[in-house]
Image (spheres, rainbow, N blue to C red):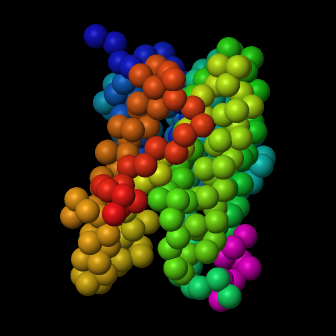
Amino acid sequence: MTGKLEDKVAVITGAASGIGRATALLFAREGARVVVADWDESGGSRIAEEIAEAGGEAVSVRTDVSQAEDVRSLINAAVEGYGRLDVLFNNAGVEGELAPTADCSLENWDSVIGINLKGVFLGMKYAIPHMVSHGGGTIINNASVAGVVGFAGLPAYCASKGGVIQLTKAAALEYAKAGIRVNAICPGVIATPMVERVIGDNKEMKKSFEALEPVGRFGTPEEVARLALFLATEDSSFCTGAPFIVDGGFVAA
């Protein structure tokens, strides 16, 4: 029995941990050849090795998604190494500093927008021409429920994720007839290193975050990865330009 991504080539940014790691492992199990991208070079190499040890195929490329030349080199490495690019998961992201809008530093704004929004733009900018030349592909952009509703103290993060959703819609319209589908994932509170950095050992904060989710718990990276798999395959063949919310009911509350 073949996997849902058999012989496909997938690039995943921010793949050294959290949602990116879970998605890289799942895509590989489904038959994809995975290009693991992360600015954490050792972490990315560990994931590529883990995939290889499980019988899959992967390479690791150190990438700062806010830097155009890094992203161009990443996409070129995938195409030159495997001959094509079928799936791009623009997953890399950071939360930035916690501060209200007037106290948000320019450095924090530039950093968060550069990684979370510019990084998605660069991934699409350099991947789309290759997908067009090969007759299509799928792009998944990791946004957030913070792109749908506001969170006090995270102006740059909210702006970046709202921007990802709108950028997704624009690209989906532009390349629909070229056979490229572009969708966004909007996770709620997921048990990832990002959330761990925010919460730390604060048990009360953990309870308050859990209370945001009507289901009463954090989501798991694997639950988001399964949505990414759906969007990467023909199971979602009539889906493009949409934000897919995976949040345990947070936005519905």
Residue ranking furthest to the front: 253
Q: Is residue 122 left or right of residue 62?
A: right
Residue 37 shown in magenta: no
Q: Is residue 196 visible?
A: yes
Does residue 123 appear in this view? no
Q: Residue furthest top?
A: 1
Q: Position of residue 65 (x, y in %)?
A: 66, 52
Q: Which quarter of the rendered picture does the C terminus lie within?
A: bottom left
User: How far across and how far down the image is residue 33, in percent?
Assistant: 49, 25
In this rendered view, identify the residue nearer to me: 58 or 225: 225
- Across and down, in percent, residue 96 comes to 57, 73
Residue at 68% x, 47% y: name it: 167
Q: Quadrant of residue 11?
A: top right
61 shown above or below 33: below
- Closer to the camera, 139 or 244? 244
Left/right of residue 165 with respect to residue 31 in the rendered view:
right
> Which residue: 24% across, 82% down?
203
Report x, y in % for residue 76: 71, 31
Quadrant containing the N terminus in the rendered view: top left
- Frontmost residue, 235 versus 85: 235
Q: Does 219 appear above or below 81?
A: below
What is the span of residues highlighted in magenta in the rendered image? 103-110
Q: Which is more toward the observer, 192 or 15?
A: 192
The tally of labels here is 0
Q: Secondary structure of the magenta portion, mostly?
A: helix
Vertical placement of residue 228 versus 246, above or below? above
Q: Quadrant of residue 122?
A: top right
The residue lying furthest to the bottom in this view is 103
